Amino acid sequence: MNNSSFKAELTQWLAHSKKALQNTNSFSSEEVQTIQAEIEKREALANELKTANSSKNAVAFEGSYNIIGLNQDERQGRYFGFLHISKVSEIRVNAEWVISGEQVQQGSGFYHGDTLVINFSYEGEVENAGKTYKGVVVYKLINDSILTGFWSEKHGNDEFLGFEEGRKLKASETIWEQAKMN
């Protein structure tokens, strides 16, 4: 990837991430502060990467990510959480998401080059208890620390795609097990 296309992808990733701060009236002030803090970390990472030579290593995508996403509906409702990706073979991966500190989703898939494809599922909550939701997410690895993706699920609105942006957590940040407990 040449430097100008990398910078364009980085700019788009940051812009998509910032969409999570639009129409946050359904979020608590604590959730808005959490998202604002994450956006600040993403801005700092983007500034750092714009001046450095960025690398992409297909094996280095393993780890935990802070994610911000837009749902697959007309309102494009925002969500945030964590994603953990682990390699299970030469091309296979497992994934686990914790959305808004409570909804757990599981997935498995594969990677090729700079692309991850993961089939996911999760159990419905409250009025949808007992219903299993399934879908697929496709991520592009921008570099070793950033992924951007889109997703669709069987029971979603076919006129829309969901979007998800991820920033890899550093060892000093919240660890995966703590995220699952919150």
Image (cartoon, grey):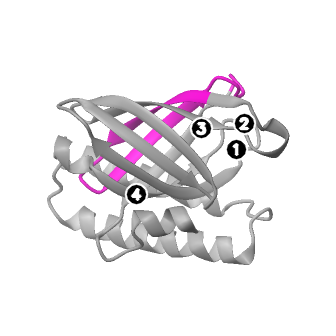
Q: Regarding mark 1 in the picture, which secondary structure is present there?
A: loop
**Do the numbered discs 1 and 3 sit on residues whose CB atoms are within 8 Å?**
no
Query: In this rendering, which labeled residue sits more in front, label 1 or label 4?
Result: 4
> Marks 1 and 3, Cα distance to the nearest angstrom?
8 Å
- Give the label on residue 65, or none: 4
Numbered range of the magenta stretch: 134-159
Question: N-terminal of the two: label 2 or label 3?
Answer: 2
132 horizontally vs 90: left or right: right
- Give the label on residue 100, or none: none
Judged from this view, the residue extending furthest toward the right is 127
Amino acid type at image mark 2: Asp
Q: Regarding mark 4 in the picture, which secondary structure is present there?
A: strand
Question: N-terminal of the two: label 4 or label 3?
Answer: 4
Q: Is residue 47 above or below residue 58?
A: below
Q: Residues within 10 Å of mark 1 (few under 14, many from 20)?
A: some
104 horizontally vs 8: left or right: right
Residue 22 coordinates in the image, percent (x, y): 69, 60
Q: Regarding mark 3 in the picture, which secondary structure is present there?
A: strand
